[in-house]
Image (spheres, rainbow, N blue to C red):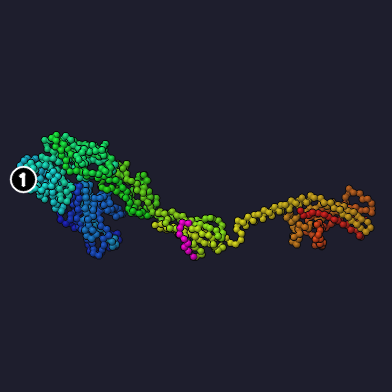
């Protein structure tokens, strides 16, 4: 494959987010636009860059793909290149890149260098560099050699290696140090001899771990398809070998071993886990199942011919890795951009597809790329246990990684105990509650009286005895703080009631008074109703100067009270239960016969009713010692005989005994 030789200066492609380019050129220079490397080895892509003086480089890195609307990813973050790329440059002028363990898939990409200048965040990138790979292969001319023949061996490649490589030749895996040795890719043997028989291979200095396959010149050889292979713990792996031997030999036994030439199938550590496949001519494959970390060793192929010749050469290194979830950044706060990486200690030989799990459930998330999972704005809902696996080998997933999302206190509140009416000297407790991650490490209490706010104390609970001014409110609030932030609660009002009895006692007293008043009214009304039915006998004795006129009557009283529908004058309120007024009417009783003309007898029925006293009737004074209640009445006399009416000195007396009050 032809390549461009000599230095190539590439004008950088610029992508400016803001500002204008300063003076001076921006450029990236590669030694060649196409670099040739050895498959399985490493290659350096020499690179230099320049920018205007006085500016400072913020970032310098290589990438292979642009991302729409986003900065391109670093090449070393791509799972296919993880652990295989190394930036050998600096942030001044050198931008050399090294790619190790070169693979066929590496030639499918175009590699570009990118630089970000700190001032105005100016950005520029170099043009693309392509990569080609080649194997080393030994060819013999002539193909068939006989003793004393002239022989030429060539270490050939499919592309021209850069940096003028120096070649090393091997016979039976040992470097040649005789007169045939040369630093060229061509080695000549003037006269082939028995001592020259053997397996020949070549390598490039600095890449000795990646020699060419051997060519057997009437000799013996064992080669491996790769010098090392990476496999996943718990999975299966295949190790391939290729071997040659003289045509007059027949292979009778072929096997793999680690040490002591002991067949791997006989090792207890591998019992039931290894198989051999292949034929007895040139190829042999070792399969190891259910890999564990102890299987990471070097494995050698060995064969035995029918002539009791036992031959082995070289080795193949097996690397075993586990999957591990790594998080960036190490500590995640709410709102952070988070990248989870399914990491391995070596690059898996295949290009795996990764599957992500959260709390043991597959994640259907579009924000995944290669072996990474992106969380663009972390929230507490993103917290959980994350793991990853390789598609097709899901049973060998990584251990779960608990992802914690830290956030500042929220839903902060303060509560008072006990609640209800408070009194001077009462002990109260204020409690602060908050939801935070990590938990709140400091609670601070503040008291506000009027416009003044004073720091009270620290701690989740605040206890004190009330010593407040009556009717003066004090407002308490707490501040919850953790390593992420802080939040204040709403205020809790603490105050004492005004002077006087407590509201509960006052209310109970009012209810009691009301009940007693209602019962009293009911009892009074009932007693006076009883009094109405009481019959009082009254004897009325009339004594006149000429003769006496006895008048008899039945008098009944009807007790009345203001509470039963009658109004009592204001000037008699204090005596309303002591004074009763009655209207008395006298009617002749026909059941009694008048004995004679000189003796006129009148009978009357008297009813007492409480009424407003007439203003023209004076109220006689009450005797202090009298146990009887005197009642006054306006009397109307009807049906008296003429004898009784004409007596100038006729007087009607009445003595009434009543129990007006209960």
Residue at 29%, 48% (x, y): give it: 343
Q: Can residue 532 be seen here? A: yes
Task: Give the vertical position of 278 relative to 496 (above or below).
Answer: above
486 on left or right of 646: left
Residue at 60%, 62% (x, y): give it: 499
173 on left or right of 87: left
Task: Give the vertical position of 280 relative to 597 (above or below).
Answer: above
Q: Percent position (x, y) of residue 660? A: 78, 54
Q: Percent position (x, y) of residue 214? A: 14, 43
| Front in this rendered view, residue 37 or 623 | 623
Q: Can residue 645 be seen here? A: no
Q: Percent position (x, y) of residue 447? A: 49, 62
Main SS of residues in magenta = strand
Badge 1: residue crowd in 10 Å (few <14, some 14–19, many ≥20): few
| Front in this rendered view, residue 368 or 203 | 203
Q: Callout 1: helix, strand or loop?
A: loop
Q: Residue furthest front?
A: 260
| Front in this rendered view, residue 526 or 114 | 526
Quarter of the image holding residue 468?
bottom right
> Does the magenta portion include 560?
no
- How many labels were placed on the picture? 1
424 on left or right of 618: left
584 on left or right of 161: right
Which residues lie in the magenta part? 452-461
Q: Percent position (x, y) of residue 163? A: 15, 53
Residue at the spot of label 1: 190
């Amino acid at each position: 494959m032809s390549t461009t030789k000599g230095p190539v200066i590439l004008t950088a492609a610029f992508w400016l987010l803001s500002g204008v380019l300063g003076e001076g050129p921006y450029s990236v220079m590669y030694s060649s636009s196409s670099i040739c490397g050895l498959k399985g080895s490493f290659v350096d892509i020499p690179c230099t860059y320049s920018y205007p003086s006085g500016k400072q480089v913020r970032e310098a890195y290589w990438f292979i793909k642009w991302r729409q609307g986003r900065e391109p990813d670093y090449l070393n973050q791509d799972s296919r290149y993880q652990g295989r790329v190394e930036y050998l440059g600096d942030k001044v002028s050198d931008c050399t890149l090294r790619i190790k363990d070169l693979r066929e898939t590496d030639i499918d990409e175009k590699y570009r260098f990118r630089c970000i200048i700190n001032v105005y965040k100016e950005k520029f990138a170099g043009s693309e560099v392509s990569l080609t790979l080649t194997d080393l292969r030994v060819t013999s001319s002539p193909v068939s050699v006989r003793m004393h023949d002239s022989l030429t061996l060539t270490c050939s490649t499919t592309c021209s290696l850069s940096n003028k490589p120096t070649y090393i030749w091997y016979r039976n895996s040992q470097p040649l140090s005789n007169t045939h040795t040369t630093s060229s890719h061509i080695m000549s043997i003037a006269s082939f001899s028995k001592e020259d028989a053997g397996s020949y291979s070549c390598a490039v200095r600095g890449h000795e771990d990646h020699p060419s396959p051997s060519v057997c010149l009437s000799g013996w050889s064992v080669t491996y398809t790769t010098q090392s292979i990476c496999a996943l713990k718990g999975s299966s792996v295949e190790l391939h070998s290729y071997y040659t031997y003289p045509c007059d030999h027949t292979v009778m036994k072929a096997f793999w071993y680690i040490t002591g030439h002991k067949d791997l199938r006989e090792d207890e550590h591998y019992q039931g886990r290894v198989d051999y496949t292949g034929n007895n001519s040139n190829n042999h494959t070792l399969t190891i199942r259910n890999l564990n970390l102890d299987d990471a060793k070097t494995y050698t192929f060995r064969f035995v011919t029918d002539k009791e010749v036992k031959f082995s050469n070289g080795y193949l290194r097996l690397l075993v890795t586990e999957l591990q979830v790594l998080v960036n950044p190490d500590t995640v706060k709410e709102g952070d951009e988070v990248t989870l990486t399914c990491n391995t200690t070596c690059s898996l030989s295949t290009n795996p597809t990764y599957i992500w799990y959260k709390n043991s459930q597959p994640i259907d998330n579009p924000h995944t790329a290669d072996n990474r999972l992106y969380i663009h704005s972390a929230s507490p809902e993103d917290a959980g246990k994350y793991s990853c696996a390789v598609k097709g080998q899901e049973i060998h997933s990584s251990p779960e990684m608990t992802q914690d999302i830290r956030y500042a206190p929220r839903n902060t509140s303060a509560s008072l105990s006990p609640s209800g009416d408070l009194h001077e000297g009462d002990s109260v407790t204020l409690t602060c509650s908050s939801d935070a991650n990590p938990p709140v490490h400091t609670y601070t209490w503040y008291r506000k009286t009027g416009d003044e706010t004073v720091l009270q104390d620290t701690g989740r609970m605040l206890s004190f005895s009330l010593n407040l001014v009556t009717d003066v409110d004090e407002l308490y609030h707490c501040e919850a703080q953790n390593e992420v932030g802080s939040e204040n609660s709403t205020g809790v009002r603490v105050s004492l009631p005004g002077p006087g009895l407590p509201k509960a006692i006052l209310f109970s007293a009012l209810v009691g008074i009301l009940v007693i008043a209602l019962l009293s009214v009911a009892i009074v009304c009932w007693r006076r109703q009883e009094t109405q039915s009481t019959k009082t006998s009254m004897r009325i004795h009339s004594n006149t100067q000429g003769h006496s006129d006895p008048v008899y009557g039945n008098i009944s009283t009807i007790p009345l009270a203001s509470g039963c529908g009658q109004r009592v004058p204001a000037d008699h309120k204090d005596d309303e239960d002591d004074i009763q007024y009655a209207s008395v009417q006298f009617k002749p009783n026909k059941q009694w016969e008048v004995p004679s003309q000189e003796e006129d007898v009148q009978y009357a029925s008297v009813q007492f009713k409480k009424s407003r006293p007439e203003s023209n009737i004076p109220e006689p004074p009450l005797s202090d010692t009298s146990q009887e209640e005197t009642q006054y009445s306006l009397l109307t006399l009807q049906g008296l005989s003429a004898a009784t009416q004409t007596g100038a000195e006729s007087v009607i007396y009445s003595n009434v005994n009543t129990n007006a009050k209960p």
